[in-house]
Image: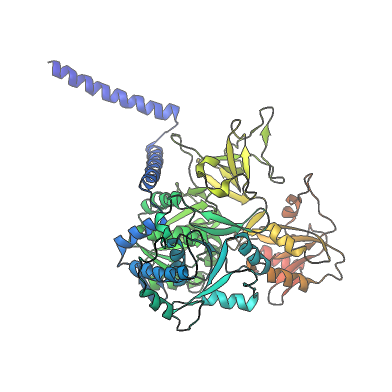
């Protein structure tokens, strides 16, 4: 009888306890359905998985080379890399990187050396990357579009960079367009062409690789210093636009990235060794290198690289390589939508997932439906790794999600700011920042403790914008420079890039770098550079408002020549607007709000407006007819 009472008590208690839990979830946290409950559970599971992954990496001291070696041991005979008709297994790439590493070691590259890599997408790029890291060096990845002063600045900004690796295509391009005296910069240049029969002290070709095979991998204690690096050591450098006007070197540490890739992407989208990932994005780009390459390393899959993106052959390339995943940036997707004829709807493609960032809300659904893509993994990220937001709701434009059950760190905030001065709006008399409401655009900021002790985030670094006293006195956040909005669905939506950079052709353009280039011309008094929106294009096209001595004598050909010889092609302004004067703020920053609102609309612009003509290497005056064609999207700008 006593047992029966116990059983009855339990049967009564369980529903009561469940009702109590449901009441808390509903009334306290606002969870009002199974879908809501499942989403919150998945968020908690993600946080736990990410946290446990970080603990495991730290305890086991899992550094970059240990991760690579683990993949080689596990997937050694599987194909790792594919380019054209050639394939290379994990073991083969490992052997090639050992050969290049031994050669570079003989030439003086050792623990702590900074070695530049300026290459188009190639086997040599990935082999060189691995070789330098194995030696304990730090590869610095240069954009192959860099020219003149921008290139020299990047080389000089890394004071320890005494070596530069080029492949055949990058060397030919550099020699043809802007030859640089590397000897004057005290930089030794090596040509990496692994199957070349050419012989020379600076050529890493077939003969060198054969000779390196005769040298034992174990010779010279300390050669492979990468084995003993800390789990959070700086692995290499990517270049991105800096607030000072020129590209800045951003140090990369992979301790957090391994966990993000594994938990947020590989686990969530079930990426396995059976997947073949296709990328036509440049490997110096963080999406192709940090995301694509390293997802492949972790999952044991195959990475298919193409030298450059082609609208005409993109879909046929996917089919020929039987790719199951492809990487994208937003502008690429818009190009593909504008050239649907290259896609054959009746042909069976193996693609199950598109992975990338910048897919505009306006083309998300058309892109997905037109090309029959089962799933899109859109994310928001920055080269500096300030923030990473993955798609949770799978809605057009939706990124990340603010959980109702807030357990663990909540690193992101969206605050009100003045878009002209870029300063946060503060509440008086407290002096704290004003947080944005739902559907109110504001500045995305991230807690500084989210990044540990990495050197780029030290306050002495002028490229990092710190904010203090945000929610309470003494707290510290980092300004991402991006305007976002929190929707009523508790998800983030990207709105615009603020400040001294804008995005065009999938690349960041530093306005001060372009302006300083224009100001080199003696007849230019002032130059203000900003980005403007154009129908049918992602990002913003560059526009320069300039004050000159005399417009009648000003040489537009000289302007184009100065810009094209010193800037990457994507940074050359599309429009040039002549103005009599430029307004500034109290702190002498140019006021760009009105200029951006005027856009290229000739009905509101006083003064002449010019459009770039790359074929004639000049700028030509805009007409009302040209203006209307651009507005209708009938003129494609590049």
Could you say which is closer to the camera, residue 526 or residue 359? 526
Q: For the point 49% across and 48% down, which residue is it?
A: 389
The colour style of the image is rainbow
Q: Is residue 576 above or below residue 411?
A: below
Could you say which is closer to the camera, residue 379 or residue 602? 379
Residue extending farthest to the left is: 1
Residue extending farthest to the top is: 2
Q: What is the number of callouts on the image?
A: 0
Q: Percent position (x, y) of residue 18?
A: 31, 27
Q: Percent position (x, y) of residue 610?
A: 76, 67
Left or right side of 159 for 70: left
Residue 322 visible in the snapshot: no
- Say which quadrant the N terminus sits in: top left
Q: For the point 73% across and 68% down, which residue is it?
A: 611
Q: Percent position (x, y) of residue 602?
A: 77, 61
Residue 575 visible in the snapshot: yes
Q: Percent position (x, y) of residue 585?
A: 78, 46
- Say which quadrant the C terminus sits in: bottom right
Could you say which is closer to the camera, residue 637 or residue 565? 565
Left or right side of 416 for 330: left
């Amino acid at each position: 009888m006593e047992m029966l009472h116990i059983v009855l008590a339990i049967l009564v208690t369980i529903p009561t306890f469940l009702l109590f839990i449901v009441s808390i979830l509903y009334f306290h946290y606002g969870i009002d359905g199974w879908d809501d409950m499942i989403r919150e559970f998945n968020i908690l599971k993600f946080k736990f998985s990410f946290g446990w992954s970080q603990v495991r990496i730290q305890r086991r001291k899992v550094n970059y080379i240990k991760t690579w070696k683990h993949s080689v041991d596990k997937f050694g005979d599987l194909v790792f890399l594919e380019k054209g008709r050639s394939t290379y297994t994990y073991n083969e790439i490992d052997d090639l990187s050992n050969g290049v590493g031994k050669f570079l070691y003989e030439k003086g590259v050792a623990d702590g050396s900074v070695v530049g890599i300026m290459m188009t997408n190639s086997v040599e790029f990935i082999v060189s990357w691995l070789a330098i890291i194995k030696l304990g060096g730090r590869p610095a990845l240069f954009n192959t579009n860099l020219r003149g002063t921008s290139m020299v600045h990047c080389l000089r900004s890394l004071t320890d960079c005494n070596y530069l690796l080029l492949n055949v295509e990058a060397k030919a391009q550099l020699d043809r367009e802007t030859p640089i005296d590397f000897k004057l910069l005290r930089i030794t240049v090596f040509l990496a062409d692994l199957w070349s029969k050419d012989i020379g002290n600076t050529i890493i070709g077939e003969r060198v690789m054969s000779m390196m095979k005769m040298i034992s991998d174990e010779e010279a204690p300390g050669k492979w210093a990468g084995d003993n690096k800390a789990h959070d050591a700086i692995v290499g450098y990517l270049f991105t636009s800096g607030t000072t006007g020129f590209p800045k070197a951003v140090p990369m540490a992979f301790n957090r990235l391994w966990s993000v890739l594994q938990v947020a992407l590989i686990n969530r989208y079930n990426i396995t060794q059976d997947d073949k990932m296709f990328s036509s994005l440049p490997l110096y780009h963080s999406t192709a290198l940090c995301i694509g390459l390293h997802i492949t390393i972790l999952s044991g899959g195959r990475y298919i690289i193409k030298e450059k993106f082609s609208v005409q052959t993109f879909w046929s390339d996917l089919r020929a390589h039987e790719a199951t995943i492809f990487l994208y940036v937003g502008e690429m997707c818009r190009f593909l939508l504008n050239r649907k004829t290259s896609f054959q709807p009746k042909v069976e493609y193996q693609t199950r997932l598109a992975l990338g960032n910048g897919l505009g809300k306006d083309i998300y659904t058309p892109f997905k439906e037109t090309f029959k893509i089962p799933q899109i993994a859109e994310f928001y990220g920055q080269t500096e790794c300030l923030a990473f937001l993955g798609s949770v709701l799978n809605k057009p434009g939706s990124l990340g999600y603010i959980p109702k059950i807030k357990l663990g760190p909540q690193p992101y905030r969206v605050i009100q700011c003045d878009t002209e001065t870029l300063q946060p709006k503060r509440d008086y008399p407290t002096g704290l920042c004003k947080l944005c409401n739902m559907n109110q655009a504001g500045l995305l900021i991230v807690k500084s403790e989210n990044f540990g002790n990495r050197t780029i985030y030290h306050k002495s670094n002028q490229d990092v914008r710190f904010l203090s006293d945000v929610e309470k006195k003494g707290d510290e956040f980092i300004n991402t420079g991006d305007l976002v909005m929190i929707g009523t669905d508790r998800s983030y939506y990207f709105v615009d890039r603020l400040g001294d950079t804008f995005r065009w052709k999938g690349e960041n353009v530093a306005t001060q770098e372009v302006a300083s280039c224009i100001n080199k011309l003696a007849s230019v008094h002032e130059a203000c550079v900003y980005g403007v929106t154009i129908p049918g294009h992602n990002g913003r096209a560059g526009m320069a408002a300039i004050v000159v001595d005399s417009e009648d004598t000003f040489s537009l050909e000289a302007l184009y020549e100065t810009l094209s010889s010193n800037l990457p092609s994507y940074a050359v302004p599309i429009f040039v607007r002549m103005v009599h004067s430029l307004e500034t703020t109290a702190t002498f920053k140019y006021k760009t709000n009105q200029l951006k609102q005027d856009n290229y609309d000739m009905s509101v612009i006083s003064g002449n407006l010019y459009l770039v003509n790359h074929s004639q290497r000049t700028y030509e005056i805009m007409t009302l007819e040209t203006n209307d064609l651009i507005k209708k999207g009938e003129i494609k700008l590049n």
